Amino acid sequence: MNQSSGPEKEKSLAALDELFLSVKAYRSSHSYLDLLKFICRLPKYSPYNCFLLHMQNPDVSYVATAGQWAKRFGRRIVSGAHPLVILAPMSPVLFVFDVVDTEGDPLPNGLVTPFATTGKLSETVWNKTIFNLFRDRIRLLLEPMHASRAGWIMKAQRGDTVTRNGETEPAWYRMQVNSVLDRGAHYATLTHELGHLYAGHLGTPNEEYWPDRSCLGLEEREFEAESICYLICQRAGIANPSDAYLAGYMQSGRDIPDISFDCVLKVAGLIESMGKQTLKSRLNKGKK
């Protein structure tokens, strides 16, 4: 997960989780699922930024900077509009405006509903994600399993290796995914199991990569992994079993477990990035 270290970073992460846990509106399973659905409606923005937007205005439908509205859509910001603050890659913050705060040219069809479930996963996303598994020495096995099993992840066994571009290294983890499932189900299983890994549920080879959170209870671990899977798959436009899991929680009327929402957002963002770009190699080998 490549967390940066330092007391200021730790304080900011603790503050986000403290905020999430202390705001009563997010503690019910119904409100939590509504929050996840909101984050899924804006797949072009990181999960973190979607959460920030929800905190400021849960009714936004599509946001862009003033410059983007003018250049891409021929629209201008109306007088008295209130900017929304999100994090920017190369500067502290970025100011964006909801579509209702703009006027000008007609909106393109589908602009305010950019997310649609297609049921199909891009092969590019799948291939890039698989390519990036080497980075954390994850051996993936696509093999037939019982229909009731989707897959699992565990620490590597003796002799497990991973190979990429002619480079072979000892594996740190072994993941198996049921080959009889379709590609969308493969990806949903992969994201669920990677969610467990990067949320620290299996420990960590190096605290600089992701934290060791193996002390969490089963309910907390599963809820985090299901939330991560839900966010990634819904934002990618494919169906996933986590929808039913979270809906069942909502129907039960229970409050959500004491999870780290910071971790959920961070891991979802990481796994999404694995399907978009080649991630940098680890600075050291981690396990000896």
Image (spheres, rainbow, N blue to C red):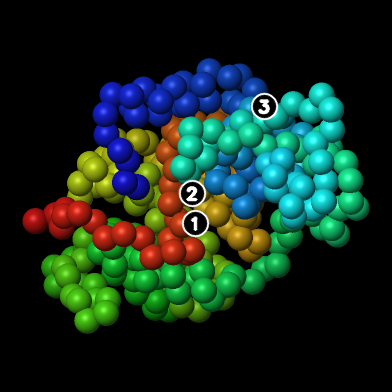
What is the spatial separation of the Cα atoms under label 3 and label 2, in whole angstroms?
Answer: 21 Å
Residue 219 image-quadrant placement = top left
Q: Secondary structure at mark 3?
A: helix
Comes first in the chain, label 3 or label 1: 3
Query: In this rendering, would 151 be left or right of 95?
Result: left
What is the spatial separation of the Cα atoms under label 3 and label 1, in whole angstroms?
Answer: 24 Å
Task: Give residue 143's position: percent from left, percent from top.
Answer: 39, 78
Residue drawn at x 21%, y 66% as measured from the top left: 171
Label 2 near label 1: C-beta < 8 Å? yes
Closer to viewer: mark 3 or mark 1 = 3
Residue drawn at x 54%, y 33% as measured from the top left: 93
Tell me the residue that label 1 is attached to: 272
**Residue 268, labelled with which disc?**
2
| Residue 148 visible, this orientation | no
Residue drawn at x 68%, y 41% as measured from the top left: 65
Q: Amino acid at mark 2?
A: Ala
Task: Give residue 139's position: percent from left, percent from top.
Answer: 29, 69
| Residue 3 visible, this orientation | yes
